[in-house]
Image (cartoon, rainbow, N blue to C red):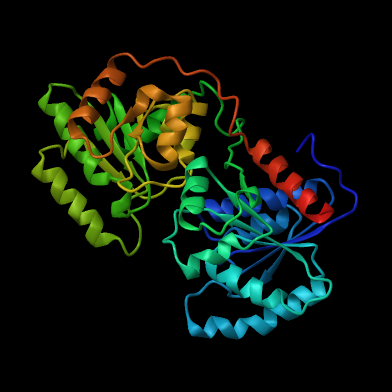
């Protein structure tokens, strides 16, 4: 990372997170950990572990395995172990990224001398209340969008606006290069695996197998386009997951009912998301509840691919700023199909992304750490 903050004095930063399996908060923890190491700070993450630990350690951070995120009374027994670990580490900053780890961290810091600084990040639109309020107790409270800042200040009137900092998540432009096109060998292999997706514009909705992601709306959109005589294909990318079999069958039933079996494909998560986006005519973001951010929007626009999404939450915020042509009112099927048809016919040009870069996020968090320590 270039242009980083002054590395003197060397800081010890401990991040608290439930686990390191997958997800936006976990990815952000790794990205900040990497930035700390690159400028000479000591980076430690405490979690229950997971598949991302290997990457974390390979990039120079330390990991301490402690289950501080399981929603169980037994988790409270970890409080003593966490306090002992923090006493040994003598961190300058403890940064909590989830509610239960934040509560344990808050209690563990009591009585520690010198007391580390406490920083929090609110990653989602959590239900307001006492349990969620712990994430607003940091000396600095990071939120990942203006939408989220408005949300927490609206629900927690006691929260001083000056403690809240908007630091959006970012992507590495090198990982999603502008105008990227996958090679012919990849395309041949992809369409051999999913022949139903060939021969027409591809609509891709990425998202785990949960009703919140708007898979039903995507299927209805495909059927509405077909009724208008517009040939298209739909890829529900990442929807097939263990434990979600009933939901997947529900989607397949709707696909059959709407008569689009030959045009729709459901897949498990894939590692070649960049290439899939690059061959897509439209990336869909149809979450039926507002989300705090919309990383998919940034990834697609970075690749110069049009995005069609509901204008609420963080997704609506990003589309309003970066691609207004892709916004439609939440749940409005008529406007959705009209806008999809327009974008499939002629999509407005997409400029190269100049913001929401990973390095911007990393530098902003490290600068915040420096401000906290400086007082």
Quick one: 153 or 123, which is closer to the camera? 153
Q: Is residue 2 above or below residue 156?
A: above
Quick one: 271 or 285, which is closer to the camera? 285
Query: In this view of the protein, can residue 53 be seen by the observer?
Result: yes
Q: Residue at x 26, y 60 (%)?
A: 245
Spot occupied by residue 242 in the image (x, y as percentages of width and height): 35, 62
Q: Is residue 148 above or below residue 353?
A: below
Residue 202, image quadrant:
top left
Spot occupied by residue 62 in the image (x, y as percentages of width and height): 74, 63
Q: Residue at x 22, y 28 (%)?
A: 335
Q: Residue furthest right?
A: 8
Quick one: 210 or 135, which is closer to the camera? 135
Quick one: 51 or 44, which is closer to the camera? 44
Q: Residue at x 65, y 48 (%)?
A: 162
Q: Quadrant of the C terminus?
A: bottom right
Query: In this view of the protein, can residue 272 be seen by the observer?
Result: no
Q: Residue at x 51, y 18 (%)?
A: 351
Spot occupied by residue 336 in the image (x, y as percentages of width and height): 24, 30
């Amino acid at each position: 990372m270039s242009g980083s903050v002054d590395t003197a004095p060397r800081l010890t930063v401990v991040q608290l997170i439930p686990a390191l399996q997958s997800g936006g908060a976990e990815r952000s923890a790794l990205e900040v950990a990497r930035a700390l190491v690159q400028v000479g700070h000591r980076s430690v993450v405490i979690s229950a572990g997971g598949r991302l630990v290997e990457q974390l350690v390979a990039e120079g951070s330390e990991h301490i395995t402690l289950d501080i995120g399981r929603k169980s009374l037994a988790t409270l027994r970890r409080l003593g172990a966490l306090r002992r670990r923090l006493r040994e580490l003598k961190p300058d900053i403890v940064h909590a990224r989830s509610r239960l780890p934040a509560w344990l961290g808050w209690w563990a810091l009591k009585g520690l001398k010198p007391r580390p600084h406490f920083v929090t990040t609110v990653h989602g639109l959590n239900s307001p209340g006492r349990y969620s309020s712990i994430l607003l107790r940091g000396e600095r409270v990071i939120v990942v969008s203006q939408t989220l800042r408005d949300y927490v200040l609206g629900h927690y009137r006691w929260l001083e606006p000056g403690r809240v900092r908007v630091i959006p998540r970012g992507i590495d432009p090198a990982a999603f290069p502008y105008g990227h096109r996958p090679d012919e060998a990849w395309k041949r292999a992809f369409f051999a695996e999913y022949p139903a997706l060939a021969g027409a514009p591809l609509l891709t909705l990425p998202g785990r197998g949960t009703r919140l992601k708007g898979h039903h709306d995507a299927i209805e959109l495909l059927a509405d386009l077909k009724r208008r005589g517009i040939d298209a294909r739909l890829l529900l990318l990442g929807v097939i997951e263990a434990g979600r079999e009933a939901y997947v069958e529900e989607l397949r039933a709707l696909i059959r009912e709407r008569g689009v079996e030959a045009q729709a494909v459901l897949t498990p998560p894939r590692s070649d998301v960049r290439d899939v986006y690059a061959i897509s005519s439209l990336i869909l973001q149809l979450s039926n509840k507002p989300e705090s951010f919309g990383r998919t929007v940034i990834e697609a626009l970075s690749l110069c691919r049009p995005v069609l999404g509901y204008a609420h939450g963080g997704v609506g915020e990003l589309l309003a700023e970066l691609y207004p042509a892709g916004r439609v009112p939440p749940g409005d099927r008529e406007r959705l199909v009209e806008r999809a048809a327009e974008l499939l016919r002629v999509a407005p040009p997409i400029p190269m992304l100049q913001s929401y870069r990973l390095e911007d996020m990393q530098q902003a968090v490290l600068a915040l750490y420096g401000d906290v320590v400086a007082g």
